[in-house]
Image: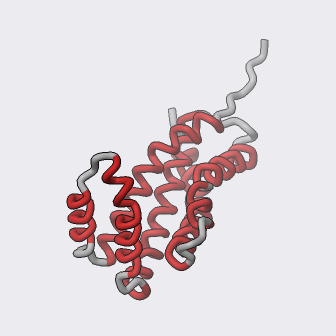
């Protein structure tokens, strides 16, 4: 049986670590947008599961005496992704509303044009991809940031399974 105190504890630590994760994502997004030739932004984004795993282990060791179940680890990871996604959504909204001026969409268009030969090699319809990109150009700042938020939460649900599986530590049984 799950006690309400346990849920409150997990949520409290996940809120704090979600704030830190959102800072990692904001730095990654800033590197991708403002330093387009650099791969630092992509490396920071790839570091996400390792960061959440590190924070989960810290939570396990600090608050739970080194023991955590899969369920609690999964709940912590999902909440961490959720809180980070909320904060990151607001940061992206500010960017898309006041700073972007169409730069992000132009960056996506450039990427599609650069990758067109590869898409054609795999038999993908380029006109569909470009049509989807043009339909995305009608989105407002709130829709862009909400789209990314939902994507981050969805990916968080999946990645949290693996993070929790790796970070589980059960109590040693006495023989």
Residue 171 coordinates in the image, percent (x, y): 71, 27
Image point 70% across, 36% down: which residue? 67
**Residue 41 drawn above or below residue 69:** below
Please identify the residue farthest to the right as the structure is shown. Answer: 175
Q: Is residue 144 left or right of residue 24?
A: left
Q: Position of residue 116 (x, y in %)?
A: 34, 60
Q: How is the image coloured?
A: secondary structure
Identified at 64% across, 47% down, the residue is 53
Q: Is residue 95 above or below residue 130?
A: below
Q: In the rendered view of the protein, which quadrant contains the C terminus?
A: top right
Q: How many marks?
A: 0
Q: Which corner quadrant of the image does residue 72 belong to?
A: top right
Camera-side residue of 143 and 55: 143
Q: Does residue 48 lie above or below 24 as drawn?
A: above
* Residue lying farthest to the top in this orientation: 175
Residue 32 percent location from the top left of the image:
52, 71
Nearer to us in this view, 9 or 111: 111
Residue at point 65% right, 38% down? Answer: 167
Q: Quadrant of residue 6?
A: top right
- Residue that appears at 56% across and 72% down: 37
| Residue 65 image position (x, y, % from top left) | 75, 40
Q: Nearer the viewer, residue 88 or 111?
A: 111
- In the drawing, does residue 137 fall left or right of residue 163? left
């Amino acid at each position: 049986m799950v006690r309400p105190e346990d849920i409150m504890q997990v949520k409290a630590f996940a809120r704090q670590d979600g704030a830190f994760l959102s800072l990692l994502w904001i730095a990654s997004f800033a590197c991708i947008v403002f330093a387009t030739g650099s791969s630092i932004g992509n490396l920071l984004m790839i570091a996400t599961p390792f960061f959440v795993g590190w924070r989960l282990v810290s939570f396990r060791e600090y608050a739970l005496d080194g023991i955590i179940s899969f369920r609690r680890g999964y709940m912590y990871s999902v909440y961490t992704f959720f809180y980070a996604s909320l904060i990151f959504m607001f940061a992206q909204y500010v960017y898309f509303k006041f700073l972007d001026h169409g730069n992000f969409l132009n960056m996506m268009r450039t990427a599609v044009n650069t990758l067109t030969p590869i898409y054609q090699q795999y038999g993908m319809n380029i006109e569909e991809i470009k049509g989807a990109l043009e339909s995305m150009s009608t989105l407002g700042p709130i829709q862009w940031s909400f789209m990314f938020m939902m994507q981050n939460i969805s990916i968080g649900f999946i990645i949290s399974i693996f993070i929790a599986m790796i970070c589980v530590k059960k109590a040693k049984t006495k023989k």
